[in-house]
Image: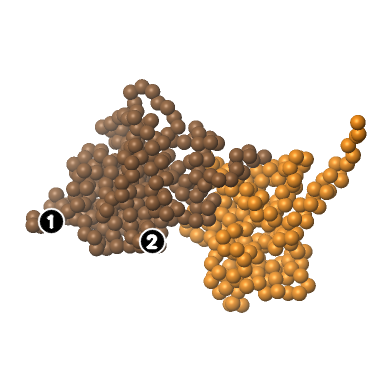
Chain colours: A brown, B orange
């Protein structure tokens, strides 16, 4: 027999339902003591996103680090949140994956219960609540922050939201980056970004930014030429979420690397 | 002191069953048909917003007849149960059989407890497989009984006529459009006088195994349904 709480009307949020029915399954529900595990658990590093006419592109490097050690070389940090949005994370990888999973179920659950898709702002706010639920762990040095990008039907454009560990939500215009390599990635993409980029150019710009992040940040994975492991790239437009195939991503990566062979610091922008 | 009237358990159950059946038979029917690419649900439902057919999980769909608030409760409980199962285990561990069992327990307990009136609902729970052999369709009745149905089935109002029409005209491996026509024609044969059920009166959804995304449930628009009904 299904418990009566399952039949109770009113809650369209999966995480709220979990907090009543099975709070131990929520990522932020644990309490930690001690000085934290920083450096001893895998961390995800750099995610970059940019908007282009009619959509948004997100890319992430593949490295997870544990202190100075490389924990994994082919980790995936960019995912579909739902049909019309993408999410990437930086920080504690275990919690990052869990946050993404919870957010995916959260959106799908709402959609099924209500028979309607949440607005882009609604999704961004829900994610804010989930990040805030993780605050206790962040205080222990196990912070995780997502980058959220979605296609917004009312404005027919891509929108990007970044978060701080307290759940603060910030809408970014044009482009954004999170993670340890984000300072370098942001500097790079700032010089390459144009608001009329094609999808192809946008992906190339993200590849350049990730290359620059890996160039200067030891925790960000650069292109792995021997193993042929390249960043994960996803595009969200009116047609929905689409992850670039490994072959297509590799072709852009090869082009970018080819350019760097000639000019290690990458493309230049005019001084004035 | 007066003794209460004695009612035999047989009589009690019969009365409760009659009550539930009466409620269910007032509504229009819902048809489920297996076709080449999956499972099709078709209900006569003029409402755009209040659904009789819904998505539960990746490969699992739900259709219901009877009292709206009662099957809506069950639908929401099903979504919660399956989402929780998929989140705590894995998406591949979510099965229609698990859901059908949970519904059967719930309906059976409500039916046989004297405290609550029986639910006036019947449900289909279906799961699309990788091939037609893997498809599963369960029919659950108000008293918690479960039946595993094959190829096609109907529940709700005048089901004998609709069921016999389906039986006569069904063929294995139908295309989607043909399955829609069959379901719509069957729903139109619910009385001695044959009706034509318009596309706008139909709520049609499929579990389509050929969809590339993990979620196989798809609601068909009135335009798609109208096109299928027109091309015969």
Is circle 1 on the same chain as circle 2?
Answer: yes
Percent of width and height locating residue A129: 41, 41
Residue B101, visible in the rendered structure: no
| Crowd band around label 1 with a 10 angstrom C-alpha radius: few (<14), some (14–19), many (20+) | few
Name the N-terminal-most of marks 1 and 2: 2
Left or right placement of residue A44 versus residue A195 in this view: right
Q: Residue drawn at (28%, 44%), measured in percent from left and top?
A: A178
In this view, the residue in front, A247 or B42, is B42
Q: Chain of mark 1?
A: A
Q: CA distance from mark 1 to mark 2?
A: 34 Å
In this view, the residue in front, B35 or B76, is B76
Residue A141, visible in the rendered structure: yes
Quarter of the figure that contains the N terminus of chain B: top right
Left or right placement of residue B102 versus residue A205 in this view: right
Question: Which residue is disc 2 drawn over?
Answer: A154
Quadrant position of residue A180: top left
Mark 2 lies on a secondary structure that is loop
In this view, the residue in front, A170 or A248, is A170
In this view, the residue in front, B183 or A11, is A11
Quadrant position of residue A128: top left
Q: Residue drawn at (38%, 61%), measured in percent from left and top?
A: A154
Percent of width and height locating residue A234: 34, 54
Question: Which residue is disc 1 drawn over?
Answer: A269
């Amino acid at each position: 027999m299904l418990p009566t709480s399952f039949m109770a009307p009113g809650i369209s949020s999966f995480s709220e339902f979990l907090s009543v029915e099975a709070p131990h399954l929520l990522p932020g529900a644990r309490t930690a003591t001690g000085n934290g595990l920083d450096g001893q658990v895998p961390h995800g590093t750099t995610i970059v996103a940019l908007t282009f006419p009619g959509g948004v592109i997100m890319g992430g490097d593949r490295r997870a680090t544990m202190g100075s050690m490389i924990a994994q070389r082919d980790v995936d940090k960019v995912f579909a949140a739902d049909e019309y949005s993408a999410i990437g994370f930086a920080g504690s990888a275990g919690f990052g994956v869990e946050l993404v999973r919870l957010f995916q179920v959260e959106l799908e659950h709402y959609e099924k219960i209500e028979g309607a898709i949440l607005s882009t702002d609604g999704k961004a706010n829900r994610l804010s609540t989930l990040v805030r639920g993780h605050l206790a762990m962040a205080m222990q040095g196990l912070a995780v922050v997502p980058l959220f990008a979605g296609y917004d039907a009312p404005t027919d454009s891509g929108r990007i939201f970044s978060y701080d560990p307290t759940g603060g939500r910030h809408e970014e215009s044009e482009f954004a980056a999170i993670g340890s390599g984000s300072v370098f990635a942001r500097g790079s993409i700032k010089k390459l970004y144009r608001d009329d980029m094609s999808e192809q150019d946008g992906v190339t710009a993200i590849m350049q930014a990730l290359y620059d992040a890996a160039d200067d940040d030891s925790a960000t994975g650069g292109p792995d030429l021997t193993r042929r492991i390249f960043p994960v790239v996803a595009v969200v437009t009116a047609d929905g979420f689409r992850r670039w195939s490994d072959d297509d991503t590799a072709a852009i990566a090869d082009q970018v690397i080819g350019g760097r062979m000639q000019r290690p610091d990458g493309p230049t922008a005019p001084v004035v | 002191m007066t003794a209460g009237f004695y009612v035999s358990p047989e009589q009690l159950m019969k009365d409760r069953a009659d009550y539930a059946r009466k409620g269910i038979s007032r509504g229009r029917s819902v048809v489920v048909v297996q076709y080449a690419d999956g499972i099709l649900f078709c209900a006569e439902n003029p409402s755009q917003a209040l659904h009789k057919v819904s998505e539960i999980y990746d490969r699992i769909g739900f259709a219901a007849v009877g009292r709206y608030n009662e099957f809506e409760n069950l639908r929401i409980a099903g979504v919660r149960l399956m989402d929780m199962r998929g989140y705590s285990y894995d998406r591949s561990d979510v099965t229609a059989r698990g859901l059908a069992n949970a519904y059967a327990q719930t309906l059976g307990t409500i039916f046989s407890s004297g405290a609550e009136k029986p639910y006036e609902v019947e449900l289909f729970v279906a799961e699309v497989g990788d091939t037609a052999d893997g498809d599963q369709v369960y029919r659950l009745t108000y008293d918690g009984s479960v039946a595993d149905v094959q190829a096609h089935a109907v529940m709700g109002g005048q089901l004998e006529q609709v069921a016999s029409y389906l039986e006569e005209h069904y063929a294995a491996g139908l295309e989607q459009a043909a399955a829609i026509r069959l379901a719509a024609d069957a729903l139109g044969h619910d009385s001695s006088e044959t009706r034509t059920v318009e596309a706008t009166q139909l709520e049609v959804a499929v579990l389509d195994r050929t969809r590339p995304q993990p979620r196989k449930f798809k609601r068909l628009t009135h335009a798609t349904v109208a096109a299928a009904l027109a091309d015969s």
